[in-house]
Amino acid sequence: MTNHHWRTPLWSSVAALALFSAGAATVLSWRDTLPDPLATHWRAGSSVPNEFMSLNALLLTAATLVIAGCVLFGAIAWFWGSAVITRRMVAASTVWMGGLGAGLLLVTAGAQRHLQDPNQASVRGWAVAATIVLPLIPAVVAALLVRDDPHVPATEPVAADAPRLGLADGERAVWIRRADGGPGLVVGAIATVLTFLLAVALREWALLVVPVLLAGLFTAMFAFTVRVDTTGLTVRSLVGWPGTHVPADEVERASVTEVRPVRQFGGWGWRVGRGGRVGVVLRSGDGLLVERSGGRSFVVTVDDAATGAALLNTLADRARR
């Protein structure tokens, strides 16, 4: 277990709890100006609250949400955090969860300051949008703070039985393919349309930022360029992020594997699967599997994966020379 596995969830959890604590402390300072109980839920399409709880219960519920998120993401980093992209996702998600918990407290309680009757409370769409969007700022900073994986050249030759592509000495080759579409893109499109329709139906125009963000996210997650050249394997979203690079001298073996997105990765997109394997999983079927030094592995579902694997093994042989 490397230091990276526990350091990332530790400091990101501390940051998340600090954000949440700041929000909780602010809300506690408002205690004398708040009704008891507080409105905590509103009917869809209505400004009339239909659920209530005490301030202490609200704080406990929000704290439980944040702590559960820290534990969940920390477990992912601890058991499956061998790749830097996984640890960055964990750090960003953990910090975002802390900011979300703080935002929920501030928005819910802030809307009820100086009210005698919680039934009069209402939460504006811009406040809900801010609760979702603003925590993305510290989340991105957290992801950028995660250190890159050290360069660890493989100490053993490429597996003798791994496929190769016949190249003459001095001959160069590049393999490039597009990986896009798949069921995940359909799910993303449906989610984007539904959130758009919800914002329009509620006439909360600030909430339109949510489908815009979803559209950007799914565009980034479901269209990639896959390239094999003398430097190794490069997989990058068509919008520039996310992406990853596997140096040729870290490749221990490249091969074709059968990918089952839901069973092996729990869904589609940029995923972390069993054993910490990172994958760009857009559909079922053949994928290019790269086993690399440090016990790490990466898979991408792409057409003609056999040619990409054979060329990568050949170039990995050359990198060792």
Image (cartoon, helix red, strand yellow):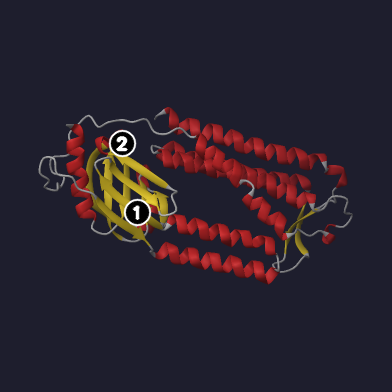
Q: Tag 2, which secondary structure?
A: helix
The amino acid type, in three-letter code, at marker 2 is Gly
Q: Can the viewer see residue 292?
A: yes
- Contact (Cβ within 8 Å) of mark 2 with mark 1: no
Image side of residue 153 versus residue 29, left or right: left
Residue drawn at point x = 75 percent, y = 52 percent = 108
Q: Disc count in the image?
A: 2
Q: In front here: 241 or 22?
A: 241
Residue at the disc numbered 1: 225
Using the numbered discs, state the Cα–Cα distance from disc 2 to disc 1 in whole angstroms.
Answer: 25 Å
Residue drawn at point x = 47 percent, y = 65 percent = 187
Residue 217 appears at what percent x and percent y?
Answer: 50, 56
Q: Is 63 situated above or below 304?
A: above
10 Å neighbourhood of mark 2: few (<14), some, or many (≥20)?
few
Q: Is 102 situated above or below 283?
A: above
Image side of residue 179 versus residue 190, left or right: left
Q: In front here: 225 or 28?
A: 225
Image side of residue 275 versus residue 133, left or right: left
Quadrant of the rendered structure where residue 19 is? top right
Residue 253 appears at what percent x and percent y?
Answer: 22, 42
Q: Tag 1, which secondary structure?
A: strand
First-in-chain label (2 vs 1) = 1
Foreground mark, 2 or 1, reads 1
Image side of residue 235 versus residue 97, left or right: left
Picture quarter with the N terminus: top left
Q: In front here: 237 or 200?
A: 237
Q: Can the viewer see residue 158?
A: no
Quadrant of the rendered structure where residue 64 is? top right
Residue at the disc numbered 2: 295
The amino acid type, in three-letter code, at marker 1 is Thr
